């Protein structure tokens, strides 16, 4: 009787372990396209990603770089003070999107141009995404809110 209980307990532990490993693998597989890594313009210039890789870019919208094209297409450059990356976006930009302001875009880097599928801008006058602040501080360009 004791041997049977011990054998049953081992079987339950093995089945639970296999189920846990399988569910972890399935979750990882399902999330593989949903994970977007953040890169600053300097990192993109140093190590250009593959054209099929979707990632996030962040920095400041370069002054004088916003060019509105036909329809909803907008071209501009994003900089972290060390490098500048041209960006194209087709769609409606956030209301607070402006030159010399922080932004984060999701998309891919194809033929030297970041093709954004989504653009996020700060949500108030003082906020800037932590990744953008870190990238700007690394380049020595970051200014505290309220500084000129």
Image (spheres, grey):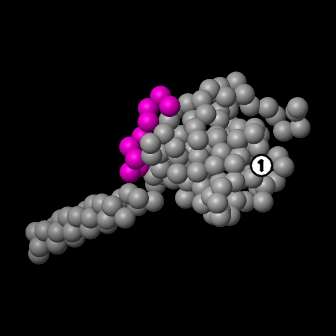
- Residue 78: which quarter of the image? top right
Q: Is residue 51 left or right of residue 144?
A: left
Q: Position of residue 4 (x, y in %)?
A: 11, 73
* Foreground of the two, 25 or 58: 58
Badge 1: few (under 14), some or many (20 or more) residues near its Cα, within 10 Å? Answer: some
Q: Is residue 115 left or right of residue 19?
A: right
Hey, which residue is sitting farthest front in the picture?
70
Q: Give the position of the N terminus as an image quadrant.
A: bottom left
Q: Give the position of the C terminus as an image quadrant.
A: top right
| Residue 51 on the magenta segment | yes
- Residue 64: which quarter of the image? top right
Seen at 65% across and 64% down, the residue is 71
Q: Which residue is mark 1?
A: 98
* Foreground of the two, 49 or 12: 49
Is residue 16 visible to the viewer in this orientation of the structure?
Answer: no
Q: Position of residue 76 (x, y in %)?
A: 65, 45
* Foreground of the two, 54 or 99: 99
Per the picture, the main secondary structure of the magenta-coloured stretch is loop
* Foreground of the two, 2 or 106: 106
Q: Position of residue 91 (x, y in %)?
A: 63, 63
Residues in magenta, as a range = 45-53
Hey, which residue is sitting farthest top in the picture?
140
Q: Is residue 26 left or right of residue 93?
A: left
Label count reads 1
């Amino acid at each position: 009787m004791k041997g049977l209980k011990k054998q049953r307990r081992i079987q339950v532990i093995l089945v639970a372990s296999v189920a846990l490993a399988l569910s972890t693998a399935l979750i990882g597989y399902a999330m593989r396209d949903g994970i977007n890594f953040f890169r600053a313009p300097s990192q993109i210039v140093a190590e250009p990603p593959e054209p099929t890789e979707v990632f996030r870019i962040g920095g400041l919208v370069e002054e004088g770089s916003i060019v509105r094209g036909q329809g909803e297409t907008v071209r501009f450059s994003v900089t972290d003070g060390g490098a500048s990356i041209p960006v194209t976006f087709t769609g409606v930009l956030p209301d607070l999107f402006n030159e010399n302001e922080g932004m984060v875009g999701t998309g891919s880097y194809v033929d030297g141009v970041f093709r954004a599928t989504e653009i996020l801008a700060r949500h108030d006058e003082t906020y800037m995404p932590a990744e953008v602040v870190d990238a700007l501080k690394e380049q020595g360009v970051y200014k505290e809110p309220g500084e000129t």
